[in-house]
Image (cartoon, grey):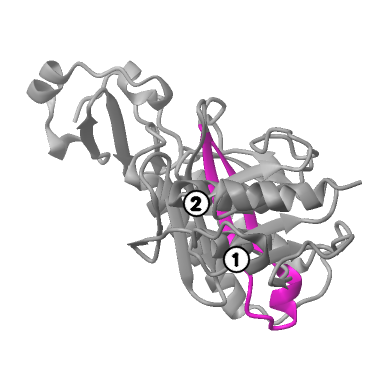
Amino acid sequence: MQIDGAGARLLGVQIDFPQLSQRVRLHEVPLVVDVKTVVDRLALQIGDEARYVDDCHTPTLPSVLVIDPKRPEVLETFHRAADAVAAVLAANDDWGASGVRDGQYAVDLEADDACLDALYRAGLRVLSEESGVTGPPGSGSAPIVVVDPLDGSTNASRHVPWFATALCLVDEDGPAVALVANHATRERFSAVRGGGAERDGLAIRPSGAVELAASIVGASGLPTHHYGWAQFRALGASAPDICAVACGVTDAWCDMIDDGHGVWDYLASVLILEEAGGVAAEVFDRELCVLDHMARRSPVVAATPELLDAVLGHRRRP
């Protein structure tokens, strides 16, 4: 197979298809390129060959380059990342501290490494709770994935069955693709912007609750007063907490702590909630989608706008 230098430089793909069809001899080189045309986009799967082709293919190049962030390959990559974390957890018997920062377990770093490996192979950049903003070589303009490798680490360490991996791809229009994998229940919630939300492949919807007095509300942190709910729950992991609202298990969820969460804690599950038909807000009216490792927010979500307003009214009380 003969490939022009410009064609091999994958981050600036330029292929003349008529000439390509005339010049292909698959027996001539060890690299096989699977080309799929998708409207005006292009997805390439590259064989993992550790050598150079026209001085452009190197062993450090990701084996799959995702050019269109809305393609199904993104969710497939997310599932591989979640599977890798599940394998780390299954093999883990050390719940000691990492020694890197307060509140971080050694297994948090192992889970992070597993996520990074899967996402790097897809050519994606990453904003992770554990490692900040990173990416594989040549990924400078690639979409970024916001990751919490293990949301609810303390739950996991104490065998409380409520902990998850959360991933959300963000493009120029905002959150685009999300997956939350609850490793304790083995449920997987997913959403693609404009395409609805699912739990294990089945469409989900919030409860439709509008009355706070008849609602079950999840909480992170201690409320300053009784909000007037029927009941409340404090389960200890925001990503599955918000997914519980998305599928109607609970009716709302509220961060009781000012600046209590990083974007990795909630972004994937908020996209899932909104695609399911729920609503979200920030206590101080700030943007929830923020690609800053240092930024903190206080999200509130609910099944309906009426219930969201009721919870926010109590949360914003002086």
Q: Position of residue 134 (x, y in %)?
A: 65, 39
Q: Is residue 269 visible?
A: yes
| Residue at the image point whose x is 85% and y is 61% from the top | 223
Q: Are marks 1 and 2 in contact (CB under 8 Å)?
A: no
Q: What mark, if any, has residue 216 been given in the picture?
A: none
Tell which of 5 and 205 is nearer to you. 205
Q: Residue furthest right?
A: 318
Q: Residues within 10 Å of mark 2 (few under 14, many from 20)?
A: many
Q: How many marks?
A: 2
| Residue at the image point whose x is 55% and y is 51% from the top | 304
Q: Position of residue 20 (x, y in %)?
A: 15, 22
Tell which of 44 and 295 is nearer to you. 295
- Quarter where residue 297 is shown: top right
Residue type at mark 2 is Ile
Q: Is residue 159 magenta?
A: yes
In the rendered image of this protein, does residue 296 appear above or below residue 221?
above
Q: Residue furthest left?
A: 22
Task: Give SS at disc 2.
Answer: helix
The magenta stretch spans which residues?
143-170
Task: Give SS at disc 1.
Answer: strand
| Residue at the image point whose x is 57% and y is 27% from the top | 140
Q: Is residue 130 visible?
A: no
Residue identifier under label 2:
272
Question: Disc 1 or disc 2, which is closer to the eye?
Answer: 2
Q: In the picture provided, is 118 more to the left or to the right than 259?
A: left
Work out how far the residue at label 1 is from the one at label 2, CA to CA, in angstroms.
14 Å
Q: What mark, if any, has residue 164 been given in the picture?
A: 1
Precedes in sequence: disc 1 or disc 2: 1
Q: In the picture provided, is 195 more to the left or to the right than 183?
A: left
Tell which of 184 and 238 is nearer to you. 238
Tell which of 105 and 289 is nearer to you. 289
Q: Position of residue 109 (x, y in %)?
A: 71, 60
